[in-house]
Amino acid sequence: MKTSSCLTLLSSLMIVSSTICAANDAVASPQRRRLLDDNIIDKETVLSSYSKLATQQCNFTTPLSTLLTAKPGDSCPFRVRIGIARLGVDIVEDITSEEDGSNNNSTTVFLEGTRDLIVWNMDNKNEAFRCFYDMTMNTTTTTSTTSNNEEVQTVVERGDDIMIFFPTDVLSNGVENVVSAPGLYQMVDGMVGWSTDVASGISNVTKIDGEFADLCEELGGGGDGSGG
């Protein structure tokens, strides 16, 4: 599956998240970055089981609404699973479309939400996990289609979130000094901007600001997710 920017929740991503998450989970994984859907056959049973585990480990009061997985090497050396609990009314959406004289058109979507999240190292999910509460983020996603039917998504995400950077991501403009690809990070009061060629799924990450904590290292992996 092409991973055209879903973080997401996450994002996002994302679609509104066409490749990563279901549309009704767009905030949980906004069109944003890159969490791959588990593709579990009996999802309801699995989600219920992990909701109970999240309640035990993190004292979440809201059941998980989404489970996402990154395989070894996509972010950390180990398999990562992220559980997302959506809190309250978590989608504010505004869509605008424009078309210029050259038949290029673009659609911009604004999303914001607050979630509790739990991140597991699936090699040791009973011991290696992190809980995150009241994480609030917002994304602006512009999808542009040229006259040659080439589709590009440009995303800016701000706030608090869990961000995955894949091995195929291109880090530029100093981004490589803050994070590494592959890598898994907690973004605190930060901002990340990237553009994705939808056909190839390759993202160019060009903007970054804020605090980024290396979760691969915290969950027991280090190495590929160690940051710049």
Image (spheres, rainbow, N blue to C red):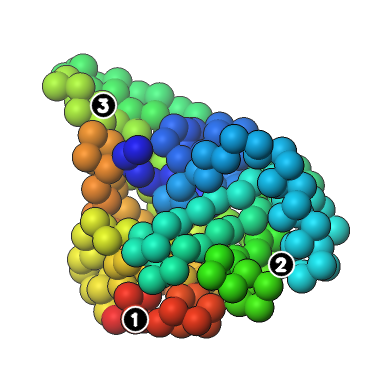
Judge left or right: residue 14 versus residue 77.
Answer: right
**How far from the left and from the top, in percent, is residue 86?**
71, 49
Residue 223, numbered circle: 1
Q: How many marks?
A: 3
Whether residue 93 is visible, yes or no, is no
**Type of amino acid at the residue the image marks with label 1:** Gly
Q: In this picture, is 32 found above or below 132?
A: above
Q: Secondary structure at mark 3?
A: strand
Which image quarter: residue 176? bottom left
Give neighbour class at mark 2: few <14, some 14-19, many 20+ (Cα, 10 Å). some
For the residues labelled 3 and 1, the Cα–Cα distance comes to 38 Å
Tell which of 4 and 151 is nearer to you. 4
**How far from the left and from the top, in percent, is residue 114?**
68, 55
Q: In this picture, is 14 found above or below 107?
A: below
**Type of amino acid at the residue the image marks with label 2:** Tyr
Tell me whether the residue at label 3 lies in contact with that at label 1, contact meaning CB atoms closer than 8 angstroms: no
For the residues labelled 1 and 2, the Cα–Cα distance comes to 27 Å
The residue at which mark 2 appears reads as 133
Which image quarter: residue 6? top left
Residue 145, numbered circle: 3
Q: Which is more foreground, mark 1 or mark 2?
A: 1
Tell which of 212 and 193 is nearer to you. 212
Q: Is tag 2's residue or tag 3's residue first in the polypeptide sequence? A: 2
Give neighbour class at mark 1: few <14, some 14-19, many 20+ (Cα, 10 Å). some
Quadrant holding the C terminus = bottom left
Judge left or right: residue 9 versus residue 191.
Answer: right
Q: Which is more foreground, mark 3 or mark 1?
A: 1
**How far from the left and from the top, in percent, is residue 219?**
53, 78
Tell which of 177 and 118 is nearer to you. 118
